Amino acid sequence: MGKFQKVSHLKYQMKTSMEDKPFPAWSWSVEQCLKEYSVKLEKGLSTYDVEKQRERYGWNELEKEKRKPLWQLVLEQFDDMLVKVLLVAAFISFVLAYLHGHESGESGFEAYVEPLVIVLILILNAIVGVWQENNAEKALDALKELQCESGKVLRDGYFVPDLPARELVPGDIVELHVGDKVPADMRVAALKTSTLRVEQSSLTGEAMPVLKGTNPIFKDDCELQAKENMVFAGTTVVNGRCICIVVTTGMNTEIGKIQTQIHEASLEDHDTPLKKKLDEFGGQLTIAIGFVCLVVWVINYKNFLSWELVDGWPSNIKFSFGKCTYYFKIAVALAVAAIPEGLPTVITTCLALGTRKMAQKNAIVRKLPSVETLGCTTVICSDKTGTLTTNQMSVTEFFTLGGKTSASRVIRVEGSTYDPRDGGIVDWACYNMDANLHSMAEICAICNDAGIHFDGRLFRVSGLPTEAALKVLVEKMGIPDNKARNGIRDTEVAASNLIDGNTVKLGSCEWWTRRSKRVATLEFDRIRKSMSVIVREPTGRNRLLVKGAVESLLERSSHVQLADGSLVPIDEQCRELLFSRLLEMSSKGLRCLGFAYKDDLGEFSDYYDENHPAHKKLLDPTCYSSIESDLVFVGVVGLRDPPREEVPGAIDDCKEAGIKVMVITGDNKSTAEAICREINLFSRDEDLTERSLTGKEFMSLSPSEQVKMLSKPGSKVFSRSEPRHKQEIVRLLKDMGEIVAMTGDGVNDAPALKLADIGIAMGITGTEVAKEASDMVLADDKFSTIVSAVSEGRSIFNNMKAFIRYMISSNVGEVMSIFLTAALGIPECMIPVHLLWVNLVTDGPPATALGFNPADVDIMRKPPRKTDEPLINKWVLFRYLVIGSYVGMATVGIFVLWYTQASFLGIDLASDGHTIIEFSQLRNWGECRSWSNFTASPFEVSGGRLITFSNPCDYFSVGKVKAMTLSLSVLVAIEMFNAFNALSEENSLYEMPPWRNPWLLVATAVSLGLHFLILHVPFLANVFGVVPLSLKEWFLVILVAFPVIFVDEVLKLVARWTRKARKEKTA
């Protein structure tokens, strides 16, 4: 972000905090809130008041952040040490090519190949970088989609039915109905129905819709979840109607604060561990390159600078600009050799291949570097609702009384989704349904307003999740009528074959609703904590079916029904049994609902519709408690948002891999702890005093205590957490040096997802905001997929180390080759374009193929690698200096052999007719013009082409074409053998043969094919200054290149012995 943007952002924040700081509406009464805005609940704001408020607070919309201009994004892509060195090398190469062409009068394309190729690579890298940057900031746009478009607003005494939401101002009076999206943060002023429920899980992480009321909460510093008289922008009304007062709009709303937090998190740029290592490596490489280039140039000073000493002072100084430029060009060639130009391309390719492999495992990577970062993750901070749990309420067990009041039956239910076919009731036979189970199924099916539909991927709910879970239970229980049950089964089979699979057929629920017609509803309220319906039974009599809080129903129950249908008065022993069962279920983190009924309804026994004389009592909620008295208690159902089946195993895998798991949720403490025990995060009897805190408790600790708490070994759980708490925990962990992966699905998770090293969003249940703020999206929403992705990330890093070592060893060899050439004073055996070709094209396929190396078997039994672990340690550096020295000696050696030896190991080198010279002559080739009687014979190359010289001294420039080709071919052959060496850091090729990675065999064949291409295609041969080789010359090339295998095998053996000795010493 630019300086100007930061200043304006700070000004905006100061303005918000000083001028327009919202008052704590939740702790004020409705009358005080109305007085604050000088507004009446029955009239609303006047047009004049609206204009005044808008001048002060602005429009009700989220701010659009200014994006970085394209030119700034492009420039940022070049802010890298290796890239800067390459740019300088390209510029110098261009200048030297131009000067050479100007002096010789030639302006061939060949001279400019080197700088053009380097520039092309840098442009391609910049394009990829800019594209990634532009895709990174869509989270803020997704937030805007959450905003409501219009609302029913009271202005000047009249309701405006569809006022655009952006026109709302603080003080506006808004009416909300079922299904409405809340347009701003508002104080509930009056309920139009007995209850109001709002779905705010995406904002707070609560699994259940929250019951809202009008009473003030007398706490100034209050967490979001506790603000039960406030409704927040972007949440949805799922039950009831109400009148609200707009309190905050636009960027001051909770969703606006989240946008600010996402923006602040995006400003905290953090490099991935790999980028840090590559930058560090780039800096070290730059210093080494600069030093070696200077040394090479200086040791050859005698070739372009000479003087005579007269009286101790230099005189008659001679300087050859041509030769100075020549050796400077050699220094540039050395820089080109030392820089692994192909490294960025190969890393990008390897990461891209890694993303494909992860996508096959349902982990969709949005940002390439995240693939590698996953491999060194040390902490996974996970949301609970929707990540560790299914975010789908389900019944896990229920109980009723048996044949007597002292005996109860607990029946377990399997299944964790809204799919009626997911699981079933353990040891269940629906044709054996007794009176109690019969009554329970009837109440669950009819005292219920929920619906279930299938969206193609997931079973979703309309209405309350608890009621949907009860309908699923009824489907699993079935019905007592055998004939109707067979009909339902046939209907379900037919429905499963229909093209429209979105409608979920709830046959058992429909049977109950047809059997017992619903004639009236007594809505839920906070006082009696229950909801009931009056139904007309098949007998023609009315019955009251009730569900609600167990304690509340027991207080109003006089009898209990036994399994045979008999009614028994509730005695103290029976009450104790029921309460002990309730306590047992609650301790498991279950939400318990009680069920009861009443047959003797008095004046409601013949109720039929609103024309009945007793109807007026149903309009008054204060009468409901008396109607729901003298009940017959039936049983209790235990519901919960269950953990995903695969989570406990994945948690165990994390522990084995040395990864700490922390759960950060908006849900309440007891539920969070119960789920964490169930998924094996904590043991059943573990003391959670220092392991489980609410967000508020954690924030009240001093910074040192917070760090101390987080650094203690073992897992943690933070409940009742707000977005800012999640962000602060992630920030602290990162400051402690941890690599943090944060998972989440809600809007409230987005800032922390953006701030974490790896933000992981849920693909099915996740909001668009969470997905856009993330680095990775889980297509199947499974926590275990994260563990698979971590394993894949570790494997990718190991493979990356393999190809980085391979490429660096190749570059060390090239540097040694040029260094030896310069040190010996012989003609250059390879020109810069050769080195570019080897670095980019020839080395590329094998390096990429090393990315396909199979993963180690024990990869997830090792602790995460340390972030300060070097890419190349001292031993590896020594190994590749040894390998590089051999590469240098082999490439320079074959060049010298061709000039000075007629045969080598029985191979005739002089059969082409070239002139054999002394090694001393080769070292002093620059003085060729002063040699008397020196001649160079023309010689023939493969294909019948004759190499001739107008000047004998051209034998060391034009005539070195065959020697250069031999050197280049030896280098390419050694690189191929070296690729086999890189299969494993320490294991011998005997243990890890090349065919373990068939892609490497294909890649080496491709590289050799490309090398043959430049030798045998005339145009390319001219560009690269090479000629075809004969069969015996190829035999010589292989003979010189192959020993690199033995050299590395000896070094690997030493490494294995050293590791074994160190292990025995520590043991």
Image: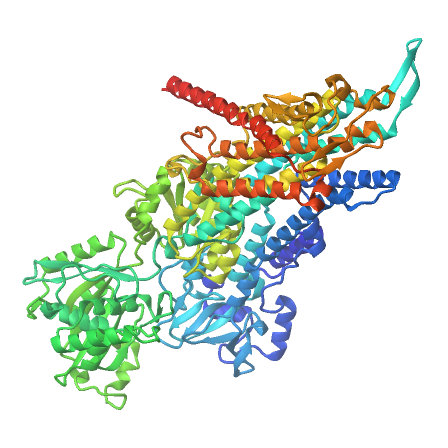
Q: Image quarter for residue 833?
A: top right
Q: Quadrant of the C terminus?
A: top left
Q: Is residue 161 left or right of residue 957?
A: left
Q: Position of residue 427 (x, y in %)?
A: 13, 60
Q: Is residue 694 visible?
A: no
909 lies above or below 369: above
Q: Nearer the viewer, residue 38 or 329?
A: 329
Q: Is residue 595 visible?
A: yes
Q: Residue at x 45, y 50 (%)?
A: 357
Q: Position of residue 185 (x, y in %)?
A: 50, 66
507 lies above or below 270: below
The image's colour scheme reads rainbow
Q: Nearer the viewer, residue 879 or 313?
A: 879
160 lies above or below 3: below
Q: Nearer the viewer, residue 24 or 180?
A: 180
Q: Image quarter for residue 250?
A: bottom right
Q: Position of residue 529 (x, y in %)?
A: 28, 67
667 lies above or below 480: above
Q: Is residue 481 left or right of residue 853?
A: left
Q: Nearer the viewer, residue 300 or 472?
A: 300
Q: Residue at x 65, y 33 (%)?
A: 968
